[in-house]
């Protein structure tokens, strides 16, 4: 099963445009947040887009994937850089599950007494 990423991106931009038109202050707030992420300038656009894709993988946001995959490609990210980024995201998710599993075991041992 393939995802129509171009269609998803187009529909998402349309939907977000309607939301922005209906609530301009919300759009202004989102733009402020976006600008704040790049305010220091320590990371280039490509690195920020790759980070966004790692986060999108962990939060399972298809629209975020579409927006930031296009952004990463436009910023010059290579497929190899993306694959390494995604490997970090997979490792983080596995690590988080491991850490939370230890918390669950502790809660069970504490609360089950």
Image (spheres, rainbow, N blue to C red):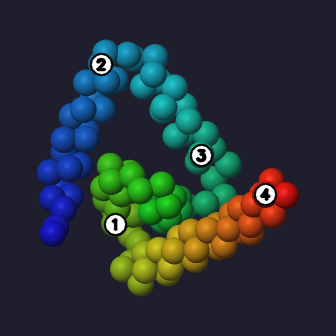
Locate the N terminus and report the quarter of the image it occupies.
bottom left
* Residue 92 in view (yes/no): no
Instruction: Say which of marks 4 and 3 sits in front.
Output: 4
As drawn, the label of residue 37 is 3
> Which residue position is annotated with label 2?
21
Judged from the image, the secondary structure of the residue bearing numbered disc 2 is: helix
Earlier along the polypeptide chain: callout 1 or callout 4? 1
> Which residue position is annotated with label 1?
73
Q: CA distance from mark 1 to mark 2?
A: 28 Å
Earlier along the polypeptide chain: callout 4 or callout 3? 3
Q: CA distance from mark 1 to mark 4?
A: 51 Å
Q: Nearer the viewer, residue 74 or 84?
A: 84
Earlier along the polypeptide chain: callout 3 or callout 2? 2
Instruction: Say which of marks 1 and 2 sits in front.
Output: 2
Instruction: Say which of marks 1 and 4 sits in front.
Output: 4
Crowd rating for badge 2 (residues with CA inside 10 Å; few <14, some 14–19, many 20+): few
Judged from the image, the secondary structure of the residue bearing numbered disc 3 is: helix
Answer with the quarter of the image where residue 53 lies.
Answer: bottom left
Earlier along the polypeptide chain: callout 4 or callout 2? 2
Q: CA distance from mark 4 to mark 3?
A: 44 Å
Q: CA distance from mark 3 to mark 2?
A: 23 Å
């Amino acid at each position: 099963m393939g995802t129509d990423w171009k269609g998803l991106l187009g529909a998402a931009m349309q939907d977000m445009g309607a939301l922005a038109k209906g609530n301009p202050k919300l759009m202004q707030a989102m733009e402020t947040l976006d600008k704040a992420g790049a305010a220091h300038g320590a990371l280039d656009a490509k690195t920020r887009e790759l980070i966004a894709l790692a986060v999108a993988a962990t939060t399972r946001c298809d629209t975020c994937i579409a927006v930031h995959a296009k952004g990463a490609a436009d910023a010059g990210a290579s497929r190899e850089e993306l694959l390494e980024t995604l490997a970090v995201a997979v490792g983080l998710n596995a690590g988080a599950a491991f850490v939370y599993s230890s918390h669950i075991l502790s809660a069970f041992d504490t609360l089950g007494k």
